Image (cartoon, rainbow, N blue to C red):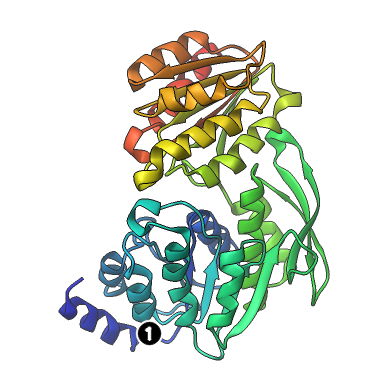
Amino acid sequence: MTDELYRKASEHLSHLSFPFIGITGSNGKTTTKRMLAAILRRHGRVYDFAYDADTADKIARELLLVEGQYEWALVKIGATAPDEISLSARLVQPKIGIVTNVGEAHLGAFDSIEKIAEAKSALIRQLPKDGIAILNRDNDHVRNMANSTAAQKLFFGMSEAADYAAANLDQVGPEGIAVTVRRKRGTSLRLKLPVFSLGDVYNALAAIAAADALQVPDTIIADALENDFVLPDGRGKLYRIGDICILDDTYDATPQSLLKSSKVLLNFRDYSSRLILVLGDMTSLGVQAEEQHKRTGYYLSGMPIDLCCFVGKYASTTAGAVFARPITKRSVHAFKDLIDALEFLLHDLRPGDTVLVEGSESEDMSKVVKALVQKAQERN
């Protein structure tokens, strides 16, 4: 971003009277932002920055276009470079900052998890004293960010020590997740969320914490999350066609996101005749890529998944690690080419299958989702 663009965007911001809410994290930024947008739209006028406006340059360009009266603005802040979040945060001057988690995403650009955490903490350091930091208590790196700000801190997570804690989870396969949100300072809220991953329960907790800070009534929070919110494409969205379920988790997969999504797949066991995992290469892992894919295979080797298909440069590495723990009825395939994988999957798709498609944009695993959905629709 040029100095001139930054100057113009900063000057334009000075004429806007509504506060900004910044959201960052290795996973869950888009989903948390969409959840919070669904809530706030029922309560007032919210400016929701574009889906792909998550770098300092793109945020600045869109900021120059913001006109009119709003109560809040929502902006997702990514970390494509070490100073990206710091620059974006200084630009938008957030009143509320949300950090969903810190994980392996962009490990190739930062070399270590610690450096990723340091970069993401820039959002929290930028908060004013009367601001609010909403932090994942269960992630050590995020929890420690509380030490970097004088702003009010609100923690979310599974522990009762969190200000917003999830309890009494009931995972009902394709029907979603029912959860009780326990507040330290307030009444509990029972919700049935149209999500399938524990990670998305965390995202809901973060959105609810922000909504509470903005004094949104529980009736609005519940109605918005249960009826208005829809998972974004590529982030755990479910396609249910007859008795075939296809889970689309094809956006920027990491070892961290796979841990969550693979458990989602297991939650469909009672509703499926077969569980199928289709995994493309995970990118942005830098020099650790080979080792991370091998560890992924070792992890998956203990999972009761009926069919595993791996696609890409590291497919054979992951498949080889899965074979380290043979399971009699499990079938494992490795494909270097996406077209070959698609041909196999389309021929093998059966009634009662639940298929999880996981991968990064570099492999364009969304093609697998589209093809399988079309095939399932033709059968119905």
* Foreground of the two, 173 or 134: 134
Name the residue: 54% across, 91% down: 129
Q: Residues within 10 Å of mark 1 (few under 14, many from 20)?
A: some
Q: Position of residue 48 (x, y in %)?
A: 44, 65
Disc 1 residue type (three-letter): Leu
Give x and y (percent) for residue 71.
50, 78
Helix, strand or loop status at disc 1: loop
Decide: is 128 above or below 322: below
Question: Is residue 315 visible to the viewer in this orientation of the structure?
Answer: yes
The residue lying at 69 percent from left, 58 percent from top is: 223
- In this rendering, is residue 195 above or below 311? below
Whether residue 162 sits left or right of residue 6 in the image: it is: right
Residue at mark 1: 16
Residue 313's spot in the image, x, y percent? 34, 28
Determine whether 240 is above or below 102 in the image.
above
Seen in the picture, residue 188 relative to 379 is either above or below; the reply is below
> Can residue 43 be seen from the camera position used here?
no
Residue 134 found in image quarter:
bottom right
Q: Residue at x 47, y 21 (%)?
A: 372
For the C terminus, which image quadrant? top right
Quadrant for residue 149, please give it: bottom right
Residue 357: percent from left, percent from top: 50, 30
Question: Which quadrant, please, contains the N terminus?
Answer: bottom left
In the image, what residue occupies the spot 33% across and 56% down? 109
